[in-house]
Amino acid sequence: MFVRRLVNSRSIKSSARIFSFSACPPRCYMAFSVTKSDEEWKQSLTPEEFDVIRNKGTERAGTGEYDKYYPKEGFFKCRACNNPLYSAKSKFNSGCGWPAFDKCYKGSIVTDIDESFGRRRIEIMCAKCGGHLGHVFEGESFTDTNERHCVNSISVKFDKGSHSGEEAKVV
């Protein structure tokens, strides 16, 4: 059973609201190479980052730092463990209010079925630490891959460097 709660570390009027969904127990059936206790994660992540990345929360649409950010080079990596996830070239403007990517570095992301809110979605997580990134949607015809990875800005960070991994669809 999923429990929905509104987390707002500033005030009720803040635009930085994060919706959180927690399952009991989370990630109990997947093994990741980076493992930490909740207390250890809380020491390395802000409260907002922890809520989205570890408790499967969601940023409010249009509030993330990378929503309208389109670099020509570089890559996006997991904010929790620095695992390279997406090239800058895979990012596109879907108009959804969150950063959108059409492919990821091969093996960088794992998926799970999310049946919260009475509907079926495909959750995407970092393959190294299990951090929640967002969801992937198919069949929208935005790009040739026909995938839209709808990612929380707070789950990733941009790196101006280069990464030479092969890119692929996740579904």
Image (spheres, rainbow, N blue to C red):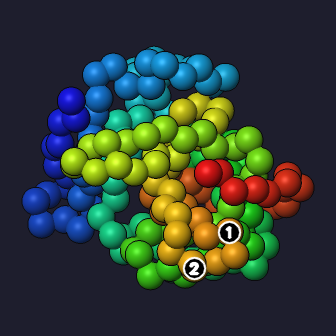
Residue 85 falls left or right of residue 29: right
* Image location (x, y in percent) of residue 170: 65, 51
Name the residue type under label 2.
Phe
Q: Which secondary structure, mark 1?
A: loop
Residue at the image point whose x is 35% and y is 36% from the top: 55
In the picture, the quarter occupied by the N terminus is top left
Residue at the image point whose x is 23% and y is 68% from the top: 15
- Residue found at the far left of this picture: 12
Residue 118 shows in the view: yes
Tell me the distance, in whole angstroms, between the alpha carbons under discs 2 and 1. 8 Å
Q: Is residue 147 above or below residue 132?
A: below
Q: In this view, does 127 lie above or below 31?
A: below
Residue 70 falls left or right of residue 15: right
Residue at the image point whose x is 72% and y is 49% from the top: 84
Q: Residue 145 carries which label?
A: 1
* Image location (x, y in percent) of residue 37: 45, 17
Image quadrant in which you'd find residue 70: bottom right
Q: Residue 142 carries which label?
A: 2
